[in-house]
Image (spheres, helix red, strand yellow):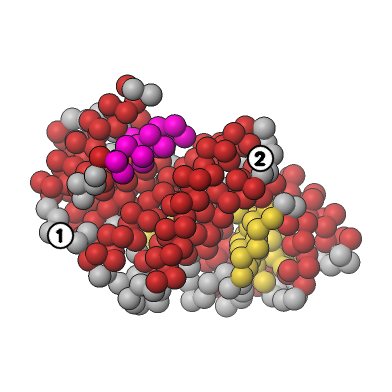
Amino acid sequence: MRYIQGFGEFDNLASHTAAYGKACIVIDGFLFDALNARLHAIYESAGKDFLAASFKGECCDGEIARISGIAGKNGVSVIVGIGGGKTLDTAKLCADVLGLPVIIVPSSASNDAPVSEIAVVYTESGEYIGSKKMKRNAELVLVDSEIIAKSPRRLFVAGMGDALATWFEAKANEASDSPNYVGRGYRRCKAGMAIAESCHKTLFADGKKALMALERGVVTEAVENVIEANILMSGLGFQNTGLSTAHGIHSGLTAVSSTHAFLHGEKVAFGIVCQMILENACDEEIDEVMTFMVDIGLPVTLKQLGVEADRENVLAIAAKTVRNPLVHHEPFKITEELVFGAILAADRLGQSYLENS
Ligand SMILES: [Zn+2]
């Protein structure tokens, strides 16, 4: 419903939750000690009270029941999630169960999930079960750029990979006239396309400058812009225009278990290379995108994702990719053979850029 981003915005959380009443704040276990203390100071000076819950690490039915149980017993009026993807998804799911509004506070800009209405559920042991659509979007996504700037560089770069896919996938969906992800799926609006394009331009204009600033742990205009591209523009872009091959390859890559150790945006990055090959993008565009991805450290080969480029692996990835609907949002007929070839050619292309970097 609302998106707020800025330096030190975390300190205004109490004033945002006050509009609803008492908040149950679900905090990433890794960040609990540091942030719980900071929250106590913030809420104390605002003369307000809150309930803290430490997230135990898995977004599963047991954890959702545990936290919504605590929140339900204590009569809270709003759920806040602070942390990484699984913490935020657990907060979304608890709010959905309880029929309460949710406020999302990401601790990194590693993907565009904070603004999406989708949460991914796992088993207690971390196996993927499926994704669930929330009844309503978050009331507020609050992004403190100071916190994001201090998060690990790898997370920020992975977020750039996820964001970089947005414009390529939007164009594929436009060409095939596929429905978007709003509600049951509708025709994409021009505003969605404009946001997706702006996401792309922002990454190229400010991506490298932003990474240099992050190496010093500081927030600059370029850092602010790329955070917005990674979270807001990428999120609004994909929901309003749709996903295609880059994310389709991402899902295909999970057929090989060694890719599980890699981040969402890292797998999507290799998916972009595959999409450019599949669409036979022009040399100029390929050169611009490949050079950028190698420069910022996104993976462009299978080996960089821990995958041996042998026939068995590539067949498994291609088979899983074509079983998923995303790759079929391209404006031409997709077969397993086409995807198989695109993956191997993409891997070779990535290799040549790595060798020359
Ligand atoms: Zn994504």
Real-space Cα separation, disc 2 to disc 1, in angstroms: 43 Å
List the residue tagged with mark 1: 332
Q: Quadrant of residue 21?
A: bottom right
**Residue 270 in the image, given as x and y percentages of width and height:** 32, 41
Residue reaching furthest to the top = 355
* Residue type at the position of mark 1: Phe
* Whether residue 316 is visible: no
Residue at 82% from the left image edge and 66% from the top image edge:
49
Which residues lie in the magenta part?
284-300
89 to the left or right of 77 = left
Dividing the image into 4 quarters, which one contains the N terminus? bottom right
User: Are the residues at dot 2 and dot 1 in contact (C-beta closer than 8 Å)?
Assistant: no
Q: Which mark is residue 11?
A: none
Query: Looking at the picture, how far across and down is residue 111, in whole percent?
Result: 49, 51
Residue appearing at x 43%, y 52% in the figure: 200
Ligand 1 within 8 Å of the CB at mark 2: no
Measured from the top left, where is residue 139 in percent x and y? 61, 72
Question: Secondary structure of the magenta portion, mostly?
Answer: helix
Q: Quadrant of residue 177?
A: bottom left
